[in-house]
Image: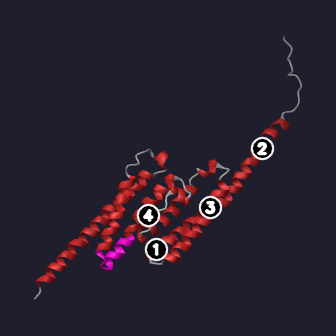
C-alpha cells in the first residue's frame, strides 16, 4: 500500500487573494458611486428636455431656452462623473439623456429657424445626436398641426419640408443598429409620422382649394 502523500505546507492564499480582490472592490465601489450620481442627473435631463420642447410648442422660446440650459447642466454633471467609467457610459441611460437633450435643442432650432447645433457643439455622441434630431423631426408634427389649425398652411408646408429634409439626411446612414444605437427604428417611426403628416397637409390643401373655389362661385 502506497502511503498517502500530504501536500507540502505553504502560506495561506487568503491574504494574497484579498490583495487581488480589494482593488477590484474599490473600482466597483467608485463605479457605483458615479452611477448613483449620474442616474438622477440623466432623469433630470430627460424631464427638463421634455418641458423645453413643450415650451417651444407653446411659443415660449425664452422658457424653452432656460429649460434646455437646465438640461445641459444636468447632462454635463452626468458626463463628467461617468468619464472615468466607460462601461457605465455605454450602459444606455447616458445615451438616452443625450438624445433627449439633442431633441430639445434641435426642436427649438428647427422651429425657430436658427442654425442646427451639431454633436460637437452639444458635446454628445454622434449616434445620440442622430437619434435626437430624428425624434425632433417627429416632434414637428405637433407644431405643424397647430399651425394648420391656425390657418397657416404655408407654415405647415414649410415644416413638412423640414421633416423631409431630416429624414432624407439620416436615411443614408445604413449601419447595423448595434453601431447606430437603434437609429433605424427611430427612422422607421419618423417615416410613419412623416407619412401621416403628409396626408394631413394634403387634405388641408385640398380643403382650402375647395373652399376658395366655392367662395369664388358665390355671387
Badge 2, how many Cα within 10 Å: few under 14, some, many 20+? few
- Residue 148 on image: x %, y %: 31, 75
Element at label 4 = helix
Question: How far is the residue under mark 4 from the one under mark 3?
Answer: 21 Å
Instruction: Locate the N terminus and report the quarter of the image it occupies.
Output: top right
Quick check: 128 left or right of 202?
A: right
Residue on which the image places disc 1: 56
Question: How far is the residue under mark 3 from the one under mark 1?
Answer: 23 Å
Kindly indicate whether the residue at mark 2 contacts the one at mark 3 (C-beta within 8 angstroms).
Answer: no
- Residue 51 on image: x %, y %: 52, 72
Residue on which the image places disc 2: 23
Q: How many marks?
A: 4
* In magenta segment, residue 90: no
Question: How far is the residue under mark 2 from the one under mark 1?
Answer: 49 Å
Residue 136, label in figure? 4
Residue at the front extreme of this rendering: 115
Q: In this view, does 150 lie above or below 181?
A: below
Residue 96 seen in render: no
Amino acid at each position: 500500500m502506497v502511503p498517502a502523500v500530504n501536500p507540502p505546507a505553504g502560506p495561506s492564499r487568503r491574504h494574497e487573494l484579498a490583495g487581488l480582490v480589494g482593488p477590484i472592490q474599490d473600482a466597483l465601489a467608485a463605479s457605483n458611486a458615479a452611477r448613483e450620481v449620474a442616474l438622477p442627473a440623466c432623469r433630470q435631463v430627460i424631464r427638463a428636455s421634455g418641458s423645453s420642447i413643450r415650451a417651444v410648442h407653446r411659443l415660449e422660446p425664452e422658457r424653452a431656452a432656460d429649460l434646455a440650459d437646465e438640461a445641459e447642466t444636468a447632462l454635463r454633471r452626468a458626463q463628467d462623473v461617468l468619464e472615468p467609467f466607460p462601461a457605465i457610459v455605454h450602459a444606455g441611460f447616458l445615451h438616452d439623456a443625450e438624445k433627449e437633450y439633442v431633441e430639445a435643442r434641435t426642436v427649438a432650432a428647427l422651429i425657430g429657424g436658427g442654425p442646427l447645433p451639431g454633436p460637437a457643439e452639444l458635446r454628445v455622441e454622434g449616434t445620440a445626436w442622430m437619434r435626437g434630431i430624428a425624434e425632433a423631426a417627429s416632434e414637428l408634427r405637433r407644431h405643424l398641426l397647430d399651425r394648420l389649425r391656425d390657418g397657416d398652411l404655408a407654415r405647415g408646408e414649410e415644416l413638412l419640408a423640414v421633416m423631409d429634409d431630416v429624414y432624407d439626411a439620416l436615411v443614408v446612414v445604413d449601419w447595423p443598429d448595434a453601431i447606430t444605437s437603434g437609429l433605424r427604428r427611430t427612422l422607421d417611426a419618423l417615416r410613419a409620422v412623416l407619412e401621416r403628416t403628409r396626408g394631413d397637409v394634403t387634405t388641408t390643401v385640398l380643403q382650402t382649394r375647395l373652399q376658395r373655389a366655392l367662395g369664388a362661385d358665390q355671387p
